[in-house]
Amino acid sequence: MNSADLTARIGSTPLLRICRIWPADSTVQIYAKAEWANPGGSVKDRAAWRIVRDAFERGLLGKGQTLVDATSGNTGIAYAMLGAALSFPVRLYLPANASHERKRILQIYGAEVVPTDPLEGSDGAIRAVRKALQEEKGSVFYADQYGNPMNPRAHYETTAEEIWRQTDGRVTHFVAGLGTSGTFCGTTRRLKELNPAVQCLSFEPDSPFHGLEGMKHMATAIVPGIYDERLADRKMECSTEEAHATCRRAAREEGLLLGISAGAALATAVRLACELEEVGKSAVIVTIFPDGADRYLSDSFWQESEKSHIPNPSAQTLLVLSAEHEAAIRAHGEKTYPHEACGALLGKAQKNRKEVCATLAVANAFGERGDLAEFAVSARESQANRYLIPPEEILRIEKEARRLGLDVIGFYHSHPDHPARPSAYDQEHAWPWLSYVIVRVAKGRSEDLASFVLSDDRSVFAPEEVKK
Ligand code: PMP
């Protein structure tokens, strides 16, 4: 390929709209730059090409001279690709535990790879390259992606401009993870010039020992020379587990094969979106997907069917319950004591807020035995398996909801002489999304009242906020 054709394909990546993990009808929109569309498969093509171009222009990377740098993988791949296309040798210092796929790609491009101590991560690679350079000064070009101003410059000149253009200037929040910090610092500087009101949020791994390849835990790492922490309006964190869980969800729900730091970016953006939506804001959040899943396919986390760590909008709901409706639920619980009372909650629902507009006591056809589990079964079956409860009761609930122009948004029941907490049985049998209000009735008097929502993956029966 003509080298100009190759370098012309760097940047101008698609801006993807997230519309299932975060719903499209929200006042908050999430977009992400699909950086795997670069010819080297990652965001680092931008920085590497800007660094190489600058070195050519300044005569630092002359004929036959070797480019040397420390890299956790993606920058190395970008250098190796450019070295092959533009005919300069490349030598890379890389932690020995970098993913198998990355090392293979580097070898296939023909780069020389020097493995460094896996326990020292990217800092170990930096120390190794510095040590080696002391011995061979002048004969090589040290690209120094952690200290080279051309790294953030690439994002200042390209990434930020693309985001601005692709959102028609509507971007309100920019979220990016920190590795060298080039992406965050360069993009932020330009976006703030274009609109000083744009909020720029950086995020880091939540611990020094993390699996977010390409990212740095700044508090415990060698801080890159190009990093300017004052640029961030806010600093956030992301755990490796949250990133993994989000990668799995993105594959199944969005059809997107994300790299791990891209999963972290999406999880962080969703958390921010939840916060903004909760306070009634409109926003256009843009984040960066630094690379795709192809470099992590041999990782085992794809198979794990562990709990969902991504904030689950349905598990963060707010239930608005007026004093009047609360009193009706309490009175019902006291009346049927020592048996449980149960009923339906009718109301209006938005994505993470439900408002009770009417309670409908259900004749205790669900079981007069004081057996709480009985209610849970019945409530569930009212959705799925109607023969277990009198069909006329279901019809009555649905008819009443229709008559009032409301939805069935949940159920309430009492726990006679038991805490206002769902039992394991409740968790097993309840339905995601619906609100389950439980009131404890002790010796005939109603006490605490709480509401719960089952997460979509059924792993957590999370308490939800109840507000008057
Ligand atoms: N994610 C991945 C997969 C990366 O390779 C990098 C680059 N080290 C980053 C995130 C962070 O980007 P930056 O170096 O621009 O901060």
Image: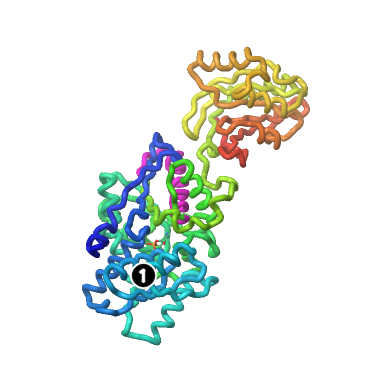
Tell me the quarter of the image containing the C terminus.
Answer: top right
User: What residue lies at 37% left-to-right and 86% top-to-bottom?
Assistant: 136
Q: Would residue 33 appear left or right of 326 to someone viewing this image?
A: left
**Magenta highlight range:** 260-284
Disc 1 residue type (three-letter)? Gln
* Residue receiving disc 1: 145
Viewer-closest of 457 and 167: 457
Quarter assignment of residue 427: top right
Q: Is mark 1 within 8 Å of ligand 1?
A: yes
User: What residue lies at 45% left-to-right and 71% top-to-bottom?
Assistant: 94
Viewer-closest of 84 and 442: 84
Viewer-closest of 392 and 361: 392
User: What residue lies at 63% left-to-right and 12% top-to-bottom?
Assistant: 392
Q: Indicate the position of residue 220 as horizontal and vertical percent values.
A: 51, 68
Q: Is residue 248 above or below residue 405?
A: below
Q: Is residue 31 above or below residue 146?
A: above
**Residue at the farthest bottom position:** 135
SS at mark 1 in the image: loop
Magenta span contains residue 31:
no
Quarter assignment of residue 294: bottom left
Where ligand 1 lies, by quadrant? bottom left
Q: Indicate the position of residue 153 as horizontal and vertical percent values.
A: 28, 64
User: What residue lies at 38% left-to-right and 72% top-to-bottom?
Assistant: 111
Residue 328 visible, this angle: no
Q: Indicate the position of residue 190 as horizontal and vertical percent values.
A: 28, 57
Q: Indicate the position of residue 98 as horizontal and vertical percent values.
A: 48, 66
Q: Main secondary structure of the magenta part?
A: helix
How is the structure coloured here? rainbow
Tell me the quarter of the image containing the N terminus.
Answer: bottom left
Q: Is residue 337 above or below residue 87?
A: above
Q: Would residue 53 appear left or right of 309 to someone viewing this image?
A: left
